[in-house]
Image (cartoon, helix red, strand yellow):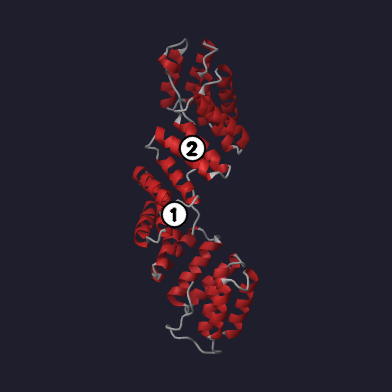
Amino acid sequence: MLAMQGISQIVLAMFLAAGPGGAVKSGAAELERGETLFKAGDLAGALQAFDNAGKTDPKDARAPYLRGVVLEKKNDLVGAEKAFREAIARDGHFAPAHNNLGAILLGRNDLPAAEKALLAATTSDPKNASAAFNLGLLREAQKQPREAAAAYRKSLQLNPSDGTCHANLCSVLRKVGDLDGAIAECRQAVRLMPESAMVLTNLGLLLSDKKQFDEAREQLRLATQKDAKFAPAWTGLGRVELRRKQAAAAVEALAKAAKLEPKDSSVAADYCRALVERDMRAKAAEEGCRRAIALDAQSGLAHYELVKILVARGDCTGAKVEVGRLGTIESTKGKAKTQADEIVKTCVPGKVASPAGKGKRN
């Protein structure tokens, strides 16, 4: 099964105009002008306005913070980091600057520094949903899924309509084995982001995990309609069709996945299996399995399926060779090796099996 991927979207929040408590300070007019220019897409003008505001009132943390937001928008992360640090120097409790600094550090994979900044943000402003979300991303990066889930839940308490956060909570709940909770969160994410092929795919994969194959197929097909180039949706759909014993549909879906990801050995192995399920005697089945092995010589599934093909053809010698290769991949007590040994015992040299003489399936 494909790994579930959360949506790693680092949030850099914009905090404009009025300061804490809504008080109007010196330079407020320039801050307001900068906001207008920023919204209009005039980044240079906004930057100049925020610079002017910062010079007018050197104690106001908003001006350097907003300057940092503009620089981040211009992809000048070094300049943005410097500006956020200046804002923090002016006001050590200015949560938006801590949050955006943490986001930059997280994107750079400087996890200890990012943690310090994000904890400062959540401590300074416990109602900062963006900071709680970024803390969730940090905990995921630290391989702490339960802590990540807690951070995402906090963020959703503050902003329940954040589809991305629902999607990421779905992902981490799956990692800790809470499939029902993960499905519930993915459904919320789909409701909020109905055009996201990734979210639809993740919901489909979870439903497949729960053996709800019909609805899984529906969600995965919808994902392919939303984005026909999103390979994981085609791969997931192909695997669900295999589990539904619909070999022809599986071949169709996995062929598209293999075209989109021609070097993905796991996709190639599943495509091999689907081809064998559809017709192990067809030339395409052997070609597909040998291609999967060429991509990954350690693909036990491809070797196993090739054994079935060779036995069906009556090539007992070739089948035994593949069983030997399979034995070097997994333990001699492994399931695939054991099943392959049983299949080879049915091999009759030179005798081509009828369509009903298929080997055992995984």
| As drawn, 339 above or below 42 | below
Disc 2 secondary structure class: helix
Q: Image point 60% across, 68% down: which residue?
A: 294
Residue shown at the point (53%, 15%) measured from the top left: 54
Q: Which mark is residue 164?
A: none
* Residue kind at label 2, given as amino acid type: Ala
The answer for how far apart the CA atoms under marks 2 and 1 are is 32 Å
Query: In the rendering, at what x and y percent does residue 208 appear?
Result: 41, 59
Q: Amino acid at mark 1?
A: Lys
Q: In this rendering, does residue 291 appear at all?
A: no
Q: Which mark is residue 229?
A: 1
Which of discs 2 and 1 lies nearer the camera? The answer is: 2
- Label 2 vs 1, first from the N-terminus: 2
Q: Nearer the viewer, residue 276 or 71?
A: 276
Which residue lies at the image location 43% right of the left edge and 56% below the top edge? 205
Q: Is residue 306 left or right of residue 225?
A: right
53 to 112, vertically: above or below: above
- Residue 151 is tagged as 2
